[in-house]
Image: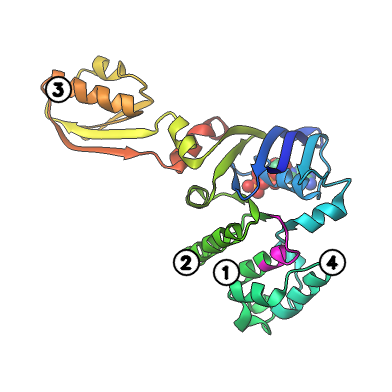
Amino acid sequence: MSVIEVSELRKSYGGRPVVDGVSFTVQEGEIFGVLGPNGAGKTTTVECVEGLRAPDAGRVRVTGLDPIADHARVARVLGAQLQQSELQAKLTVREALELYASFHARPADWRPLAERLGLTGKLTTRFAKLSGGQKQRLFIALALIGDPRVVVLDELTTGLDPRARRDTWELIEDIRANGVTVLLVTHFMEEAQRLCDRIAVIDKGRVAALDTPAGLIRRSAGATVISFTPSAPLDDRDLNALPALASIAHKDGRVTLAGTDETVNAVITLLARSHVTAHQLRVTEATLDDAFLDLTKETAA
Ligand SMILES: Nc1ncnc2c1ncn2[C@@H]1O[C@H](COP(=O)(O)OP(=O)(O)OP(=O)(O)O)[C@@H](O)[C@H]1O
């Protein structure tokens, strides 16, 4: 069952389209990633899902409800992460939890939530005195306090150290294990690769690709990279004729080819046929990072 449906969403600012026909659906229980370069339109898209912005065109549904027309009902099923500026510096963790619980008709009990998020020892600490990781954990708690079916987390781990980021990833997996669907906006490839079931890569206001992390890697041009130092020079014409070749580079006598498994098999055949030995042969799989750069390379150019 789909929890979020976005269809042909469009939004312009001052006549400039920043979301230009975005469509995707998020299934119940998924961690769905929205990934893209700066200014791609990710936040605008999720703000339309949250009902914070009205689309110019297109259709958005959250559990079948329109986030603008049915704002109150959507607020009951959707938990949104607050921005830093939305919490008063002097509010203690306990006060923030109680205050946000009071906004909901049927809030979750904040005590076990605070326990699960490791905030029990910080209940009397003021917001301004919390570390970056503790603040993020509080934001997660506040997003979950209405006992939502779906939670939207935007750039949750930006500014956290690697340890706090990993702890946050475990929390997100834990949220999903409790049956909550997660819509995650992120800049971090490692985060997206590790957490997301599927990812929409947004580029210039459009969905450049939508797939599982493994699927995105497979469809990027240079999904597999093979490098070696040949015992004798290989004919460039033979190398350039390799199937599914995405790129070729020569450096310090070493040849590096990006392509697919087909390219790897063909280069091994070529080496055997040419009686050339490949020293220090390495075959590596591209990461989501490589796939992302490939999928959004026109933007960077
Ligand atoms: N209220 C607004 N008025 C005018 N322009 C806006 C407004 N909000 C966003 N924009 C512009 O729309 C574009 C898309 O912004 P958006 O925040 O959706 O992108 P993003 O993909 O989330 O970017 P980032 O990764 O940098 O947060 C940007 O160029 C931004 O400057």
Closer to the N terminus: mark 1 or mark 2?
A: 1
Where ligand 1 lies, by image quadrant? Answer: top right
Disc 4 beta carbon < 8 A from ligand 1?
no
Q: Which residue is mark 1?
A: 133
Closer to the N terminus: mark 4 or mark 3?
A: 4
- Can you give x and y, in whole percent of width and height, for residue 6 in the image? 73, 38
User: Image point 56% across, 49% down: which residue?
Assistant: 187
Q: Residues within 10 Å of mark 4 (few under 14, many from 20)?
A: few
Mark 1 to mark 3 CA distance (whole Å): 54 Å
Mark 4 to mark 2 CA distance (whole Å): 36 Å
- Can you give x and y, in whole percent of width and height, for residue 18 in the image? 72, 37
Closer to the N terminus: mark 1 or mark 3?
A: 1
Q: Name the residue type under label 3.
A: Ala
Mark 4 to mark 3 CA distance (whole Å): 72 Å
Range shown magenta: 141-150
User: Which mark is on residue 270?
Assistant: none
User: Which mark is on residue 163?
Assistant: 2
Q: Residues within 10 Å of mark 3 (few under 14, many from 20)?
A: few
Mark 1 to mark 4 CA distance (whole Å): 29 Å
Name the side, left or right, on which 60 lies relative to 220.
right
Residue at the limit of the structure toward the right, as seen here? 69
The quadrant of the image that shows the N terminus is top right
User: Which mark is on residue 272?
Assistant: 3
| Residues under numbered marks 1 and 2 in contact, where contact means CB atoms less than 8 Å apart | yes
User: Image point 68% across, 78% down: which residue?
Assistant: 111
Q: Which residue is mark 4?
A: 105
| Residues under numbered marks 1 and 4 in contact, where contact means CB atoms less than 8 Å apart | no
